[in-house]
Every structure is written in C-alpha cells, then in structure tokens.
Image: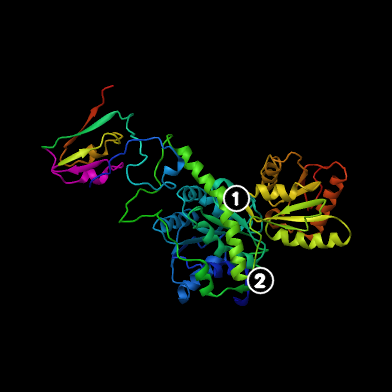
Amino acid sequence: MNRPEVQPYQKPFCIKELPLGSTFTGGHLVEKNAGWRTFRPIVDQDKCTGCLRCYLVCPDGVIFRSGDEMVIDYDFCKGCGVCAYECKARAIEMIKEEL
Amino acid sequence: MPGQKTFVSGDEAVAMGARLARPHVISAYPITPQTVVVERLSDYVEDGSLNAEFMHVESEHSAMSAAMGVSSVGARAFTATSSQGLLHMCEGLHYASGARFPIVMMNANRATAAPWNIYGDQRDSLSMLDCGWIQVYVEDAQEALDMIIQAYRIAEDPEVLTPFMVNLDGFVLTHTYELVEVPPQETVDAFLPPYQTVNKMDLANPQSLCITVGPNLNLEIKYQQHMAMVNAEKAIDAVDREFGDVFGRYYGGMVQGYRCEDAEVILAATGTTAGTARVVVDAMREQGHAVGLLKLRYLRPFPIRQVCDIAGRVKAVGVLDRDISFGLEGTIYTNVNSALSRLAQKPLTLNFVGGLGGRDISRENIESIFTTLLAAAGGVSQPEVQFFGMECATDE
C-alpha cells in the first residue's frame, strides 16, 4: 500500500526529457490537487480497527496504511466524506477546513 | 515472393491482412454498421488459423476501450468499425492517440445519420481527422490488405507510436469482389516483427498510464504528439518502399500523382474515386486534354509538401469531397487549400461535393468535373463549391 512520492516539478530544459505520451513513473508530472476541499477527514486512531474499509471505498485512493495507522494524503483528498460515512467504527470525522 | 491469388471482397481482404499481422486480440462490436471484416476474423479464431482472442463487446466505445487495454500491455490490437460506430468511438480515439497506443483499425466509410444508410460516404472518418489517428484511404482490395500490414509497421515505429485508421469506401470497396494476392505468412512475419515497446504496463517497471497532466506540461505533451504525426511521413515513405521491395507493390507513400507532370488541371480524389478518375484521365488525355489525378492517400499526416509540389504547378485544382462540412465546404477541400496557401502563387481551386449516402460517382460525373476545371483554367468564372450528380435542380 505504499504510494509513490510526488516528484517536485522541474521545468524540463528540452522536450526530449519528457516521458512518452501519457505513460510516466508514478508521481511524475503529478500536481497536488486538494485546495478546494471544504471538510477534512480526521482518523481517530484509537477507534480505528484497521479494517481497511476506507482504503477500499476512497474514490481517489488517498487512504493507506502506514505501520499500524490509517493515513490520509491531504494533498489529494477532495473531502468527499465517503470514508467517514462508510466507517463502521465511526473513527473518521469530517472537520471543516479553516481558511 | 509471390503470394496466392484469391477472389475476395474488400472486407475479406482486410480480414486476411489482419490475420497475417498476427494481432493478439480483436475487439469488436458485431452489429450494424459493422462489416464482414470481424465476422471473418472470428471464423479464423474459431478454425485455429489465427491465434488470437476475439472479444465480443457491447459497443464500439467498448471496442476501442478494449483495444487500448490490449495495447497498454504491449500486445497487438485490431478492431474494425464504420459510420455511427466510428462516431461512437470518438472519445476513445483521442485517448488512444494521446496514450500513443499503436492500434490498427479498419473503417468502412459509410453515411452518417440522419438520414442514415449503409452506403459509401466519407463524412464518418473526415469528421475524425482531429483525433490524432493516422488516416489512409485505399483504392482497391489489394491495397486494403497491404495497408493493414503496413499500418502496424508504421504505427508501431518507436518514432511514430500513433494509432492507424485504414479507410475503405463503403459498399463499392467493402462489398465488391476482386482478385487479391495474399502474401505468404513467413514473408509478412519477416516484414512485420512482433511489437516491442516501453509504453506498457510492466510489473518489472511499474508506470502510470493515461494519466492527467496539468497546465504545466500538457502543451508540451501535445506538441510531442503532433511532431510524432508530422514525422510519421518518414516512416510512411520508408515502409512503402520496403513493402514494394519485398512484396512488389509500391503505392507512392503519402500521395500518388497520375499524369500530373504536364497537366493543366488536376483533380484531387481519395479512395475508390481515384480509380474511376484514372480511367477518365486516360480517356480525356486521348482527346487532347491536359488533365491529371492527384490521389490523396494519407489525410493525416496531411501531405502538404506533395500537394504543393504537384498541385502548385497547374492552373486549376479540383477537390472531390465525398463529404460536406455543413456551413463551410468539403473537408478535404479545406485541407488542400490550407496546404496550397503556403505557395507564393496559389492555383485556382474548386470544390466538387458529391457521392453522399452511396450516390454513385460515375465516369460522366468526373468528366464533367474536368470540363468545369478546364473552363475555369481558361478564365470562365465558376462557383467555388459545387454539388455534383444531383437528381434535381436546386432552385425553382
């Protein structure tokens, strides 16, 4: 469940440095995309049973396990709340983002 | 090496060409407006003469999506469609070309709805010129078979990696029978080696496919795609020459000029109409008229240089369009004019629109077009866009 790291954008010097078409190694040419999220899911690790239901239902694939904890990648989470709604242990709470 | 001669329809010639190219998967929607091509290919899979998987899918959109899946693991994909089926694929066509999947597809050029029918008309593929696919238009069944084999060589060239559409005029080519030479499998195998690419899913080298690219580099990736198509001309010419050396049939690459050297007027035509026009050129030459034919084989990449070289020397150029871009003119006319506008001295150009919905394009039609062109070259003013072969007057 390891996710590829987003590689920082570096302006290419020449077009030949770009990969072919739209096939890239993971994390390459990816832009962070979550700035318009209104509610942020917060995992209560004490309540979490590690059932991985949130990992399965997340439409953006941004929830993953790291060690014993479920972690959310807030660079890409859109705040849809599906994880919080589906969590049987009620371990995920949606908290309004502060501007 | 000579092959075996056989009497087949244009559709069957395509199926034979596809079998010789050894695709791993054929994905196709089997119902109207589909042609016999995929029916024959399913026979070949059934009788064991083609070792491929035949996927019956629920629509042309799915056929193209499946073909992309095939190509994305580095396998060879083939599909065929026509008319509304091609239009239904449109979304996938852009995806496949942007992802640089060298899928080969046969398209039977047929009318688009409404009113719909299943007869010859090029409005389907000409409305898809901007999808990023190479487009070739063939004249007879032999060229159809040969171009399926050439298509894979060109599309899979690492410098090209662009999907390839082989267009056959509906009915007059797809459903009529001709004597066709089928090259031996060993010769085709030597000419067309298995597809090798890094542009694929690979457990040893995991990559993301068909990803999103934001404003920071989207333009550059599209530039890359455009240049691959522009440079495909080199592969097209090289493969045409090599194919001719091996199989004995040269098609001229991007275009084929016929008696254009000393011509006063020429007609630019595609597909089967080029065959009819060639006969008319011979007949009119015997009567002393300096006429010629410019057979446009490829429309993407567009043969800008060749059109300028050949059509730039004459007084008047007619463009025969089996299509109409409503509210403008025939689409091939737009493209030819765009090429000719690069010349310091552009010849007079006229557009002849006809043959829609399967209306026959006769020798008499083409003679009449040449007569109009000769009159225009002699200074007689002519309407720029003319519909020919109409059954009735267009005004009271």
User: Is A50 part of what is drawn in magenta?
Assistant: yes
Q: Separation of disc 1 and disc 2 at Cα? A: 28 Å
Check residue B210 for magenta coloring. Answer: no
Relative image position of residue B379 (x, y in whole percent): 87, 42
Q: Nearer the viewer, residue B393 or B302?
A: B302
Horizontally, residue A76 falls left or right of residue B50, namely left
Residue contact between numbered discs 1 and 2, judged by CB atoms under 8 Å: no
Position of residue B18 in the picture relative to residue A79 (left or right): right
Q: Which residue is drawn at 51% across and 50% down?
A: B93
Q: What element carries label 1?
A: strand
Quadrant in the picture for the C terminus of chain A: top left
Residue B249 visible from this viewpoint = yes
Determine the residue positioned at 14% across, 43% down. Answer: A67
Q: Name the residue under label 2.
A: B177
Compare marks 1 and 2 and give the one earlier in the sequence. Answer: 2
Q: What residue type is labelled 1?
A: Arg
Horizontal side of B376 relative to B293 (left or right) equals right
Where is mark 1, residue-wise?
A: B300
- On residue A63, the disc is none
Within 10 Å of disc 2 (Cα), the crowding (few <14, some 14-19, many 20+) is: some
Residue span colored magenta? A47-68
Q: Nearer the viewer, residue B22 or A15?
A: A15
Estimate the x, y position of residue A85 in percent, counting from the top left: 23, 38
- Residue type marked 2: Tyr
Q: Up-down: is A83 above or below B56?
A: above
Residue B210 is situated, as x and y percent measured from the top left of the image, at 41, 47
Residue B236, position in %: x, y?
A: 58, 57
What residue sits 19% from the left and 43% below the top?
A65
